[in-house]
Image: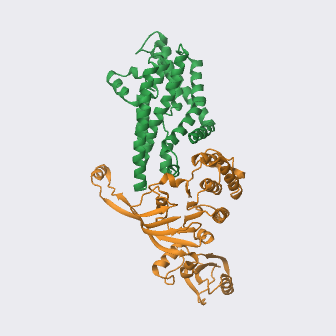
Chain colours: A green, B orange
Amino acid sequence: MRLYFEVARRSFQRHLTYRVATLAGLFTNAVFGIFFSSVYRAFYQDGERGVVADFTLPEILTFVWIGQSLLMLVYLWNWWEVADSIRTGDVVSDLMKPMDFQLYWLSRDLGRASCHWLTRFVPTFAMGALLFDLAWPGTISTWLAFFISVNLAILVSFGWRFLLNLSAFWLLDVRGINTIAVLVLNFFSGLLVPIAFFPGWLRTVAEWLPFRAIVMVPVEVFLGQRTPQSALLIQAFWVVALRLLGQVVLNAAVRKLVVQGG
Amino acid sequence: MITARGLSKSYWVARHRRGALGAMRSLVDRSGREVRAVRDISFDVAAGEIVGYVGPNGAGKSTTIKMLTGILVPTAGEATVAGYVPWNQRKSLASKIGVVFGQRTQLWWDLPLIESLELLRFVYRVPVDRFQANLTEMRSLLDLDPFLETPVRQLSLGQRMRGDLAAAVLHEPPLLYLDEPTIGLDVVAKARVREFLARINRERGVTILLTTHDLADVEHLCRRMIIIDRGRLLYDGSVEALRQRHGSHRTLVVDLEAGATIDGFVRDGVELVRADGPRRWLRFDREAVSAASLISSVVARAPVVDVAIEEPAIEDIIRGIYEGGLRAEPAVSE
């Protein structure tokens, strides 16, 4: 286990070095946060409209700012580090080492996420809280449940990204997959619009997909719309399912690599 | 240390058809062609040897190395490496071998070099005192201290290669594979890599299998070389014997002053093989004629602007093996 801790520590350290990228990212989060907040404010006629699909104005603004804060923490888009190492062939030296390949990349991602808790989540959420009237949980235990739920969201997101990355063993170019993945994630994670706003049939589709566990479920926990137990159940299911699926696909990929030479 | 018997690797390359319809047909119809990257190769490497594994691009060098590390399963043949069958016992073999791919790196790009090196202690579970002793030794052997704290992305290619070499040997593997370790390096950096390899071979008894297409690497390091081309083993024996047989010719390239000529220049063991503008290529037998005396006799005949001496390239030697001798073939290839 010490190895994986050391890997995570280095990954944390690595992501701390990207200072300019962090500042640029925070600026973008602020711009989009303020933009969406203004749109929802107009839509709710500054609160006079009351409740829309279970969301009051402060709740929908909280949804907007949690979404912006989570974006980088769960690394919703464009994470292709495993695929890059497959493309360059560096993956070979990782596969040759006496370690668990998926666990190695998970450790790297957790180190990165620890960094993004501090450099992306906290500042973005603080900006939202300063600029807008948000809906705050009443109890410490809700905060705790939210914290756990976000960490599970990171694991679900990793499981999904790891699978996507493994496609590079079969595809020469992952750009097409990336385009589709960004679209699907933006929509079905609930980042753009709360899933509660979807028409009935689409909501059913969203509920059967893993993506809501990445953004929507933690938001619902924060707002008290979902019990911690139900969130834990959904998220833990997807963590385990994606981890197992990742292992199956990885084994197939390694089998292909050792037979066909990649 | 290494035993390979009848090692072969073929790839199936699917036929590519044009257009969307063609792509759909390819899904059903799996016709294609077989590429035989390595064909029936056998050799042994004893503990403590340094063997040059040589051949032109695409000869099958990397494919062989990959099979011997276990990352590629052969189509046919057997091998044992340090007592293991590589492709069945890849993870057990991992701690017995070090691998350096010249065009790749196992170092963390954004972190100081030392971070990547220290991580290897946990990867290979090396006891801390052993690891520190090895690290101290590598720091002095490879002169790592000036850039130990520098992020790898800022290192020069030569520095990065020294870092990768250290990373490959910190867990004290008895066997080291190097795939083109000097590719892209300048003369000083190449010399440094060679000196390092010679030392760990001499002092630690590390067995080394080295692929390269730079004959100078082989000449500096190896007594024995294995030559392959198009997947087949062409030669396995001493470097010296091969040079005697096929590589005794060198080529003097002279640039004459405008209007000057050396037409009719005749000397035993020297042959004018090519002329292009003011440039002349003179092939000579290094046993019969010294470069110095040849240059002075050319200079005595015509004013010369520039001279250069070309060593035979591996491709030429291989061609020589095919033809059973070099005499009929021009030594300079463009």
Residue B280: x percent and y percent? 59, 80
Residue A215: x percent and y percent? 46, 27
* One can see residue A57 in this view: yes
How many numbered discs sit on the rendered protein?
Answer: 0
Residue B94: x percent and y percent? 53, 53
User: Eyeballing the image, is B219 above or below A246?
Assistant: below
In terms of depth relative to the viewer, which is nearer, B46 or B229? Answer: B46
Residue B133: x percent and y percent? 69, 52
| A121 relative position to B71: left or right | right
Q: Which residue is drawn at the image coordinates 56% and 76% (left, top)?
A: B238
Q: Which residue is drawn at the image coordinates 44% and 30% (left, top)?
A: A186
Q: Which residue is drawn at the image coordinates 61% and 46% (left, top)?
A: B119
User: Eyeballing the image, is A212 above or below B162?
Assistant: above
* One can see residue B281 in this view: no
In terms of depth relative to the viewer, which is nearer, B88 or B17? Answer: B88
In terms of depth relative to the viewer, which is nearer, B4 or B107? Answer: B4
The answer to which image quadrant residue A159 occupies is: top left
